[in-house]
Amino acid sequence: MKAIKKQMKNGNLYLGIAFFVMAVLFYSSSQTYEQQSQIAFLGKLLKNEPFKDFFETISFVYAGDEVSIKASGYLKFIEFFIRKGAHFGTYFLMGGSLFLGLYPRLKVIWLPSILGWLAATGYAGLDEFHQMMTDGRSPLFQDVALDSCGALTAVVLASVLFIWHKKSR
């Protein structure tokens, strides 16, 4: 337990988490859409199509394509939100981990905040470039923006909590 606390305190554990997330994302970007698709699983899980009436009222455009049940069907509509949630969540984890990993080394809040966010955003761009070279995948600027928002949310949240914690001492 002491070893884990030491790794948390010096930031190594968090940097390890960030690099693990990067490795998972690299592997994920190497897969085709068909390899990643959760449609069959969702079909078994959501046989009764819960909340379909409500979801049918939702329609918007993302990356030039309509996102709605009418345009793509119930299961692909649900999968869209799972995929975009995964984008936001993984980059939230990466941005927060980079901030927490860099803070003990830099000892100021603003620099690890900027570096953590920029590094995660840069990786998002590289990840979309990697997808461009994978069959059946299409890189989207909108996904980079979503990933960047996930990282920024984590960095801002961590910064605010650090500042609040320092002031409450």
Image (cartoon, rainbow, N blue to C red):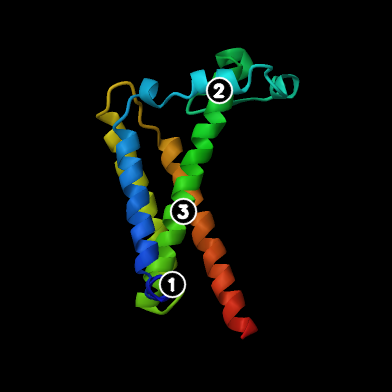
Q: Report the front residue among 113 and 33.
A: 33
> Callout 1: few (<14), some (14-19), or many (20+) C-alpha neighbours within 10 Å?
few
**Mark 2 — residue?**
42
Q: Report the front residue among 145 and 6.
A: 6
Determine the residue positioned at 27% across, 36% down: 130
**Mark 1 — residue?**
1
Q: Report the front residue among 50 and 62.
A: 50
Determine the residue positioned at 56% across, 32% down: 81
**Mark 3 — residue?**
93
For residue 108, say whether it is visible: yes
**In the image, is residue 80 above or below residue 167?**
above
Q: Report the front residue among 131 and 45.
A: 45
Amino acid at the residue labelled 2: Leu
> Callout 2: few (<14), some (14-19), or many (20+) C-alpha neighbours within 10 Å?
some
Relative to 62, 98 lies left or right: left
Mark-to-mark CA distance, 1 and 3: 23 Å
Amino acid at the residue labelled 3: Leu
For residue 67, say whether it is visible: no
